[in-house]
Structures are given as C-alpha cells and as structure tokens.
Amino acid sequence: MTMTALPDSQTGAALADVLAALDEIILGKPRQLRLAIACVLARGHLLIEDIPGVGKTTLAHALAATLGLSYQRIQFTSDLLPADIIGVSIFDRESSSFQFHRGPVFAQLVLADEVNRATPKTQSALLEAMEENQVTADGVTHPLPEPFFVVATQNPTYQIGTFPLPESQLDRFLMRIELGYPDPAVEKTLLTGADRRDLVANLQPVMTPEQLTQWQQRVPNVPVTDALVAYVQEIIRYTRESAEFAAGLSPRAGIVLLRAAQAWALMAGHRGVLPEDVQAVAPSVIGHRLRPADEEAPQSSTEIGQYVIDNVAIP
Amino acid sequence: MKAATQVVDTPRLLWTLAALVLTSLPHVMHLPWWPFVLMAFTVSWRLAAITGRYRLPGVVVRLLLAAAGFAGVLLSYRSINGLEAGSALLLVMSALKLTETRYVRDLVVLILISYFLIVTQFLFAQSVFTALAAIPAVWLVTTALMQTASAAPPLAWRRALSRSGILLAQAVPLMIIAFVLFPRFSGPFWAIPRAENAAVTGLSDSMSPGSITELLESEAVAFRVKFDGTPPPRKDRYWRGLVLSNFDGRTWSVFKARDRNLNPDTLQPLSNAIGYEIMLEPHHQHWLFALEQADPASLPRGSYLTNDRRLTRNKPVTQLYQYRVESWPEYSASLTAADWEMRRDTQFDTRLNPRTQELAQQWRSELSSDAEIVNRALYLFRNEQFFYTLSPPALNRDDAVDEFLFQSRRGFCEHYASSFSLLMRAAGVPARVVVGYQGGEVNPYTGHMTIRQSDAHAWSEVWLPDRGWVRVDPTAAVAPARVELGVAGSVPDGETLPSLFRASQLLYNLQLGWDAFNNGWNEWVLGFSRNKQIDFLKLLGMRDPSLRKMLLTMLALIGIVVGLLSVHLLWQSRPRRADALTRLYDRFCRNIAPAEGGRRPAEAPLHFAARVSAAHPERADLIHLVTNLYLDLRYTPNPQTSLSELRRAIRSA
C-alpha cells in the first residue's frame, strides 16, 4: 500500500531508518518487523513462536543492534536454574560480604531463546522480571536497565521435551508473532548471499536508547477518539459474547491492544489511532489471549485474532 | 457449535442434578420411598464420578439396575400402567439415566424429563399450590437447560437465573393468550387418569360408628356453591349425597344393585325452585351433591337421579367438576313406593340389638300410626339424657345400637341417624340413612358458599303412608344447634374444637380469604370450560366466538407479542444512530463503486480505499481524498478539516 494517511512531520525518519536497517537483515518479513518495533515502543515483550531456523534469534539480535541496546542471549535448557538468569550472590573474601553477580537478564534486550525448554520454575523467574522490571535476590532489589525488552522464542509445543508456557504467562507478552518460511525469492538470497550473522555483527545503531525511551513516551500520547475506543470495545464485547471462545478478553487485554495500536499509529505517522492500526496489531495481540471454545472454532492464535477482526463491524 | 457431544463438566452436571432433584422431590407425596433412595444413590455416584476417582457403571451393571428398577415398579404396583406406576417408572428411569450421562446431550435429555416431571404433578393435583410450586421449578429447569445446552461456558448462577427469568417473563403474555383463547374441548379428550389410591377425604358409600369423625376434623373443601339468589337458611341446607339402605347391625351401606332411574312423576314440588352452581372438588366417586330435592328436569348432562333420589354421574369426578342444578326446598316424594323397596327398608338383623327391637315393638303396640312412632323416637332423643359430642365413647362390636341407646347416649349425627333408623325399621316403619353435608358457610369476600368435609352429616328418611319419604334428622332433636349453627356451634363447652381455624378470629379470616382465592382459581382457571370461555370472549367483545375465530385470534395475538418482543430486541441492539459524518461517508462508500459492493462492516477505511482504487484507478485520487478527510474528522481529536469540506469533496465527484 503506497498510501500513508495523515503524515505527521515529526514522525518518520528515525523509525523509518530502523525499519530499513532491519529489512536488510530479515528479508521478506516487513510486517513482523513492524510488529516487533511496535511491541518495543509499546513497552511490551515479544514472543516469537516458530520452528527452529527461521531467523528468530537473528531478528532479536538485529533489533538490539539497530536500536543500540545492550544485548544478552539466554539459551533456555531443561537444567537452567533461576539463578542462571537473574544472577547469584557470592561470598567475597576481601570485603567479607556477599556480592551480587548480575545474571544475563541485566541487559536492555534479553533474548530468551527456546523459553519453553526450561522448567516452569525457571520460566517464571524470567516472567517475574518482565512483569516487575526488577529482580530481587537475597532480599535486595536490583532494578533492570531501561529500556528493558524481552524477546522470547518458543518452539511449537508439539516438539519433544518442552514445557509450553501456561496461558496466564502468555498474557505477559504483549504480542505473539510467527515468522514462517521465506518465499522462494528470499530463500534464494539467503542461500546465496552473505551470512546473516555477519551482517548483524556489522550493524550500526540508528538510534540511541535515550531516543527509544523518548519514542516510547510518545506512544500513550497518540490521540484516541471516542469512535476508536468504541471500536476497541466492540472487539472486546465480541470476544466475550461470542460462543467461539472459552473466555473473552480481559480488561488488561483491551488496554494493551489500544497501546499497541497507538504504537503502530505512531510508526505509521497517523495523527490519531485508526481502525487500521487496531486491525494491524490485533491478531498478534489478542490471538494468544483467547482460547477456542471447541474444535470448530479457529485454532491458531493468528487465525483467532484475524477471525475476530473479520467479524467485528467498525462502528 | 456442537455442545451436544461435549463431555459432561461439573457446572453443567450440577445444574442438571439440581433440576432433576428439585422436580423429583414433590413426588414424595404420592410415590413410594425407594425410587428416591435409588435417585440419591445414582446422584452420589454421578457426583463421585466427576471427581475422576470413581467410574460410571458399565453396560452390564446398568442393564441389571434397569431390570431391578423395572421389577421394583412392577412389585410396587403390579403394573407399569396408571398414573402412579407410570410416574414411579419415570422417576426410576431418570435416576438410572444419570449413570450413563457422558455427554452434554444426555444431560439435556434429563432436563427435558425434569419438565415432564413438573407436568406429572398436575396429574395428581391441580391446586393453586401445584401451580405456584411449578413456577420456581420451571424457572430452575429452564435455567439448567440454558446453562447446559449452550456451547458457551455456563454463566454465574445469578446471571443465569436472571436471564432465564427474563426469558420466562417474555413467555407469560403468550401463556395468557393461549390460556384464554386455546379452544377447550369437552369430552374425554385429555381426561386425567385416576389416581388409584389417592387419599381423598370425603364420604364413603358406607357408614359405621366412627367413620364420619375423621371428616368432621377435616377442613378440606368438599364443594363450593354459587346461588342465583339468596341461599336458603342453614337449617334447610341438606346436601343429599348417598342413601344407605343396607344395615348389618353395625354398618349402613349402599344397596348394591343396578340403579333404577327415578320416575319423575313420583316427585312433586311444593315450593319454587332455587338455582345454584356447584363446583365439586374431585372425590373420584360417581355421586354428586344437591340440595334436597333436585329437580329432575334441571340435571347436568351425564347425570341422573336414582329412584332413591341420589344424584349420580356416569363418570367418576376426577377433576374439579362444575354443574348447575335447581332444587325444591319443599317437595313430596314417592307417595306410592314399590313393595320391594318397602321390604328392603324394613330389614334388619333380628339377632342383634335385642333391647332396641324390644323398645320398637313396644312402641308399635302402644301407638297407632307411623308418624306417632317417629315422634315418640324424637321425643326420646330430645327428653332423655342424650348428648351431642364429637368424642363419644367406643361402642361394642355387635350390639352397638343397644349400647348407644341405653348406656352411653353420647354421640353425633351418625349415632343418632343409625339408631333412629334401626328403631324405625324394628317398629316396621320403612327407614334409611342419608349421608351428605349439612350447612355450609358463605364467604364474605366473594359471596359463594363453601361446604367443607367438617359439614358432613347423616340423617334419616322414613316413609309415611300419606306423605311419602320424609326427612327426619334425629341429631337436630338432640342438638338443634348442629343444624342452625353448624358443628362448631353445637359442641358442648370444654370440648376442643376439631379445627384450629375456629379457635382464632384471625386464622378464621385467613381461611376465608384463602377459600375466596381458591374459589377464584377454581372458577377462572380450572373451571374455565368451553362455555365459560365463550362467555368471557363475548364479554371481551368477540362476537360469536367460533373455533376458527378463536384460533385465528390466538395466532394473531401471539404474532403481535412475538413481533413486539422482536422489535424491542432489535431496538436494543440497533446500530447507534449514525451521525452526519458517518452517514455521509457510508453513502460515499456505497456509491463510489457499486460493483465493489460498498464497504464491508469490518473493513477499515484505508483497506476499502485500497481495494476500490485498485479496481478503479481513475477514481483513486478522489477516494484517497475523501478517505483521508473522513479519517481525520473521525479519528483525530482536532481535525484539520471540516464536514463541509468533506461534503464538497464528495459532491465534486
């Protein structure tokens, strides 16, 4: 679509540069990239669910590099312990006291790779950190860096040796996206072109963390009219009244949907949130928050989100 | 959405159990205890099974249980036919159905059975209580149905109850319309089967010492009467029921032979007729009641007078039965009585009650006419030490009349009527006992008269050569108050009253009010017969109500109600009245590219613009302009454009 409605002079260059830089690395997935950035802007966390090898890790790494964020990768395994994430206190002989050694979670962008391979106990250590933006060890609270953004990747749950995140914890992620296979043209470039990892290593930040924080602060200020709120309410009402779903969207889900739409509108340069913005983020935001009532309802989370969008009239 | 094949879950199961148990419990009143034990057992089993620790029985156990239940019903009733056996079978089988509820559709079956269980209550009784009790039951069962059959997860119970309450409230107008207008069919089209051993208090076809006492203690209504004019005075209100001509020394009973119809010529009116309407509570017997003496020309259809002037109906009265009769307070009957009748009504067992026989024969030799003998007997009751009491001493088995007349001398109507009639027979005067009711009370709220079981009475009839059959009430000779004031007024001081209601003015008034209410229920609900329906419809202004007219009106009214409800629902879920901006934009969307079918409701404006521009590139600029203006106006708080600009843009097309 060539059209950008209501261009906002202030918006633009910086975010467009981020997108352009990422597009170079992750080929053929502009929509997922935009969603990922919207997720960062809305101060949410991102869950990428797909089979291994489609570029989940690369996306997270590239995102950190482009946004100039400190980056840590935690490979989740079945024997990973909470302390391996948040850090441990070790007795320091010289000062005769315990010193807290920060774990890998103390980074601005944390990639929790294959999060469903760890035990629930370890998973919840990470999820608590995500919720609180701080870590408590031995009674001492350590704030996490600002901005703080978690990208978790998850293998589809039917693979052996996994602990799928329970529904209540899925809710901690603002969005859940899938990358999917590349199309043939992109595939060819991947096969013949340079190694993506080298490209990531050479990426230059196009934005500082401070600038990112400023963008984040602008998200809640993107104007929302009554007409748009009515639309979001219609979506929520539909999920609660429709027989397709075991339970409707929670009030929190409604709030984050609106926040994500604001982030999307900011990126698109809209002067207010449009129904299009809601529709763009909704499949990723509400899909994993709804559970189909039975086998005849749409099953995959993206399908569920799209089903809702297709069935709610814009008031 | 398929809920039917969904596996049973706890909330759905609990709703179903609640519906089933609540609708089964009232059947305790007329069914044996064991089906309820069985149900308690299967309910517990089903509840235990939902925890997963126990399993539902397999097919062999289920078959055995079903066979046992079936055999249980057969053992209890020797049949599976009939109202009670049928109800018991229904209950047993629904209890057993619980053991095979795996899917939601099995629960739905049980809920539908629960509706049926409510209906069966009405086969046993059609009182206001039954109807009132059915309201919460229907409410609960409907809620259970809504909760269980719906694919959506069950609602919280308050919300569920209020929603089903609204559903039922919407059905109330339909119920009233159908009640008033649905054509009533006369005849046994849906006759209610008779409850075999329904314990109905009422007169029986025999009378032995003590048999009426039970009645005198009962406040149950026997029938209600509405007189055309003023009712006759209490002392003349003898409601004739049965004539007991057989006497075995102790028990008076009905002469068992084929009834002979009364020859109307043997009856002569001596006064004007009084017309009245009786609403008889079901007593499951053939006899009807009427004031002495019913005019044979005024009888209700399907009934006749026997030659001993009992009013009898072809069919037993199993539902509230309403009929109209006219009676002559003064009459003469059977001036010429048949010989066989005279012989029958002078028979008695000469081996029993020797002293009574002796006394009667003494009178016969001393006195010259039958009338004098009657007066002599009444004189005896009046002037010797006879007492009217509801708690007489027990009498000895064989010579009860002797013992009563010469020793105890305490009793009430049955003792007096019995001993008087025997005295007459022993003296050669044809005599018999008549049982029925005496008195009745006018309800001040409605003006109708209520005759209760406690008004039950027995009196005698003697045949005198010049007057025919004459009513003689020996009780009135002993206690004139019995016929002038009723039982309550004639019981001696210090004896407890049979009824609590007579003890307190407040309770008595409550009872009268309740009676008035029941009378209305009988008259307007149970007694809303075909004739009453036609009268009522005429009153409402329907000229000449025919079957066709009633049905059409009913359908039309139902249509109107359903229509109104639909309009109401549509109005509630109406799209909010679009403002000028939306209307303008919607019209633009419809008109810009008719071939594209306009904007779909869920289609965002930019997506619509892209779709239509792709199909009509020549209009792309206009479409984009209008879309942007619209989005700006609608989705930004401080639009940089105005409605008139949008209007101009559209008009320029």
Image (spheres, rainbow, N blue to C red):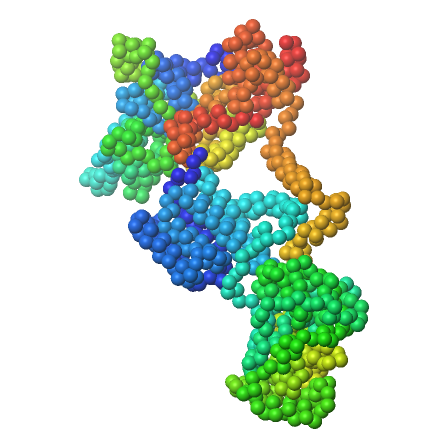
For image coordinates 26% across by 33% down, the residue present is A162
The number of discs equals 0
Is residue A284 visible from the viewing direction of this image?
A: no
In which quarter of the view is residue B354 placed?
bottom right
Comparing B382 with B218, the one in front is: B382
For image coordinates 30% across by 50% down, the residue present is B60
Q: Position of residue B637 (x, y in %)?
A: 59, 24
Quadrant showing the C terminus of chain B = top right
For image coordinates 50% across by 57% down, the residue present is B83
Query: Which residue is farthest front?
Result: B339
Q: Looking at the picture, does residue B452 appear above or below residue B586?
A: below
Quadrant showing the N terminus of chain B = top left
For image coordinates 41% across by 29% down, the residue present is A298
Comparing A273 with B601, the one in front is: B601
Q: Is residue B35 left or right of residue A181?
A: right
Q: Is residue A160 left or right of residue B538?
A: left
Q: Position of residue B75 (x, y in %)?
A: 39, 62
Q: Position of residue B500 (x, y in %)?
A: 61, 74
Q: Looking at the picture, does residue B432 appear above or below residue A295?
A: below
Comparing A227 with B110, the one in front is: B110
Is residue B319 visible from the viewing direction of this image?
A: yes
Query: Which residue is farthest left?
Result: A93
Q: Is residue B409 left or right of residue A243?
A: right
In which quarter of the view is residue A172 placed?
top left
Q: Position of residue B129 (x, y in %)?
A: 58, 59
Q: Is residue B566 left or right of residue A13?
A: right
